[in-house]
Image: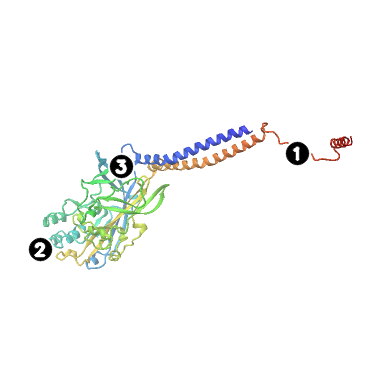
Amino acid sequence: MAAVRRRLALGLGLAGAVCALLGVCLLVVGPVIIREQVVKNVRIDPSSISFSMWKDIPVPFYMSVYFFEVLNPKEVLQGAKPVLSQRGPYVYREFRYKTNITFHDNDTVSFLEYRRLFFQPHLSNGTEEEYIVVPNILMMGAAVMMERLPNFVKLLLSGALAGLRQEAFMNRTVGEIMWGYEDPLIDAINAIVPGLIPFKGKFGLFIEMNNTNSGLFTVNTGMKDISRVHIVDSWNGLKKVKYWRSDECNMINGTSGEMWPPFMTPTSLEFYSPDACRSMTLVYEQSGKFKGVPTYRFVAPKTLFANGTEYPPNEGFCPCMQSGILNVSSCRLNAPMFISHPHFYNADPALVDAVEGLHPSKDKHSLFLDVHPMTGIPMNCSIKLQLNLYIKQVSGIIQTGKIKPVVLPLLWFAESGSIEGSVLKQFYTSLVLIPSLLDYLQYILLGLSIPLIVSAGVLMATSRRDAAEKSPLCPAPPSPPPPASETTPLLRDAAALSRDDAEA
C-alpha cells in the first residue's frame, strides 16, 4: 500500500511540476505569442488577415441623409426666422474599395479609395423623386461671396438672376440636390465673375462623393514598426494642407480613418478627413463590448468645432462665428459653407435659437467609433456631420430680400457600419478567441499545479510514516520489570536462603 502511495505521489508531483512549468512558460511566452499573432495579422501585407478587409471593405456601410426643408421661405425673405422640418432618412448602401495600391521601399503604401452609393428604397422614408424646398445654394452662396465686390458687379448679377428667374429658395428633388442638376446660373456667374465658381456642368452637394476617390493616400504599412501602421505619410503628395491659418491646423495627423495601430490606450485617436479638409481628434469615452469583442468607444470632444475664443488651438481654423461650427469655405471654393454636428449638437445655443425645428440630442446626433484596442480595427461606427449655408441680405442683389444673417442647416448625414457575419467570426476566432484561450490556459495550468503538488506532498508524507511503523529493523522497546510481591515464589526462596547463610 505504501508503495502504491509513493508511485501515486510521484505521478501527481510530476503532473503538478509539468503544469507549473507550462503555466510559467505561457505566462512569459503567451503575451509574446499573442503580440506576434496580432502584429502579423494587422499590418498592411497581402499575407495578413486584415489585408483583404483593408483593400475591399466587407463591412456593409450605409449613408443615411436627412434634409431640412424650409417651411416658410416667403417669410424668411421678409426677415422672419426660418422654420425647418426634417425629412428622411434617404438611405444609401455604400461600397468602398481601393485601387492603384503601390508598395514603396520606405515601409509605405499608396492607394486611391473609391466610394459607390446605391439608393435603398426599402430602408428609406421617401424617394429620390420627392421635392424639397431648400435655399438656392448656388445663388445665395454666390451672393455672399460677392458681397464686397463693387455695386455695379452685384447689379449685373442681380439682373442676370432676374432674367434666369432665380430666387432665394428652390424646390428640387432629393436626387437633384444630391447628385446634381443643370443650372444656367453656373455659366452666368462665370461670365460675370470669371473663376468665382471654377466648375461647369451639374451642381450637386454629393456629386463628388459617388464613383470618386478621396485623394491619394500614402500610409505606413507597419512592416518595420507596427506602431506606425496606417499612419498617414502624405495625402495627394502633401505632408500638410494649405487651407488653414496655422501650421498646427494644417497638419495631417493620424490615419486615413479606417484602422489604427494596435495595442491602443484609452486616450484618443486621430485621423485625416478629406471631407472636412482637416485632421480630427476623438477622445476615449468608455470601454464596452460589441458582439463579444472588447472595444474602446471614442467620441468627438466639445472642442472639435469650437471657435478660437472658446478653444485657442482652433484659432487657425478661423475666421470663426459661433462656437460649434467649422468654416470650410477655404476648401470649398470659398462658398460660405460650415460643418457641424447634426442639429447643432454641442454648439452655441444661439445657432439653435436662430431657427425653429432643431432638437439636438446626444443619442441621435453624436458620432462615435467602437475600436478593438488590441488590433486597432473598428467594430462599429457612426460618423455624423451636418452641412450648413450662411445666408443673408446682400445689398445690390435684390433676390436676397431682407434675409437676416443665419447659418442655415441644409442636411445632415450619418455613415454607419459594423463588422458582422463571416468577417466577424473570422476576426473573433483569430484575434480574440485564440489569444483569450492562451491567456486563460496559463492561469488554469498554474492553478492546477498547486493542488497537484500539495496532494503529492501529502501522499508522500503519509507513505513514509506508514513504512516507518512497519519496518522489522526497528526493535521494540523493553518492558519494565514487574513490581516485587510476597506471593512471588522465587523472591521468597531467595530470602530464605539468605537467612540460612547468616545463621551458619
Which residue type carries mark 2? Phe
Classify the position of the C terminus by image quarter. top right
Q: Earlier in the sequence, mark 2 or mark 1?
A: 2
User: Which mark identifies residue 480?
Assistant: 1
Which residue type carries mark 3? Asp
Residue located beneath label 3 in the image: 225
Q: Whole-Å distance between the Cαs marked 2 and 3?
A: 61 Å
Q: Position of residue 440 (x, y in %)?
A: 46, 43
Compared across the picture, whether 504 is left or right of 273 comes to: right
Q: Nearer the viewer, residue 33 or 57?
A: 33
Compared across the picture, whether 106 is left or right of 47 comes to: left
Residue located beneath label 2 in the image: 152
Q: Nearer the viewer, residue 172 or 351?
A: 351
- Number of numbered callouts drawn: 3
Q: Whole-Å distance between the Cαs marked 1 and 3?
A: 87 Å
Q: Secondary structure at mark 2?
A: helix
The relative height of residue 385 versus residue 428 in the rendered view (above or below) is below
Task: Please state which of the two labelled residues, at mark 1 or mark 3, is closer to the viewer.
Answer: 1
Residue 50 lies in quadrant = top left
Classify the position of the N terminus by image quarter. top right
Q: Earlier in the sequence, mark 1 or mark 3?
A: 3
